[in-house]
Image (cartoon, rainbow, N blue to C red):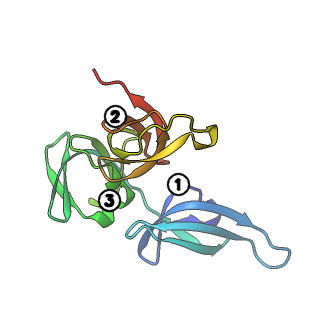
Amino acid sequence: MINATQIRKGMIIKVDGELFKVLEATHVTPGKGQALMQTKLRKLKDQTVHDYRFRSKDKVEQAYLETIEMEYLYQEGNEYVFMDIDTYEQIKLSPEILGSSINYLVPNVVFYIELYEKKPIGVNPPITIDLKVIKTEPFLKGATQSASSKPATLETNITINVPQFIKEGDIVRIDTREDKYLERVQTK
C-alpha cells in the first residue's frame, strides 16, 4: 500500500477491487481543508476513463504487472490467438482485453501482453508497425498545401491520414501510440 500522494502517471493501482492505469495525477492543495490527489484513471477491464479524488491520507494498493512477448497468430471466432515466443504456449484473448490494439493485429507481429496474477489484462502493440494501404483517394494534381494529407484505410481497417503521394498497395509505417503516419516503406 502506498499513500495517495505517491500516485504517479503510468502506475497501475487497485481501486474498489478493479485495476486502473493512472493517466493523470495532480496534487491539489486548496486554501481550506486537506490536500488531495486529483486523478484521471483508465479501467483496464473495459478501457473506460474515470475521475477520482483521493485524500492525502488515503492508502492505495499499487499493482505490479508482468509483461511477456507474444506473437499474434490468427482470429478464431470472436477471439484472437497469441503464442508465447519462449514457451510456444497459446492463449485466446477477447476484444475487450485487446482494446485499441485490435487495430494492429497482423499475423506474426509480436505484442506485449500485460498479466496480473497470471491473467491477461492488457495488450500493447509494438511502437511502430507496417501496414498495407487498401483504400485511399488518388493523388490530386495541383492540390494546395492545406490539403497535404488524405485519409487512407489500412489492411486492419484502421483509417489514418497519409501524404498525397501514398497510393493503394503501398506499405506505410505508423506510430501505434498516436495512429500517425511515419513513412512509406520501400518494398524490395
Q: Which amino acid type corresponds to the residue marked 2 in the rendered image?
A: Asp
- Label 3: few (<14), some or many (≥20) within 10 Å? many
- Label 2: few (<14), some or many (≥20) within 10 Å? some
Residue closest to the far front = 142
Instruction: Tell me the distance, in whole angstroms, between the alpha carbons under discs 2 and 1.
Output: 35 Å
Residue 43 in percent (x, y) is at 45, 69
Q: Give the residue number, with chain letter if any, for mark 1.
A: 10
Q: Which amino acid type corresponds to the residue marked 1 in the rendered image?
A: Gly
**In the image, 3: left or right of 103?**
right
- Label 1: few (<14), some or many (≥20) within 10 Å? few
Q: Of discs 1 and 3, which sits in the foreground?
A: 3
Residue beneath the point at 53% across and 42% down: 149
Q: Are marks 2 and 1 in contact (CB under 8 Å)?
A: no
Instruction: Tell me the distance, in whole angstroms, between the alpha carbons under discs 1 and 3.
Output: 18 Å
Q: Nearer the viewer, residue 90 or 5?
A: 90
In the rendered view, tell whether residue 183 sits above or below residue 63.
above
Q: Give the residue number, with chain letter if any, for mark 3.
A: 98
Q: Give the residue number, with chain letter if any, for mark 2.
A: 170
**Residue 48 visible here:** yes
Which quadrant would residue 171 be assigned to in this image?
Answer: top left
Residue 19 in percent (x, y) is at 42, 68
Q: Earlier in the sequence, mark 3 or mark 2?
A: 3
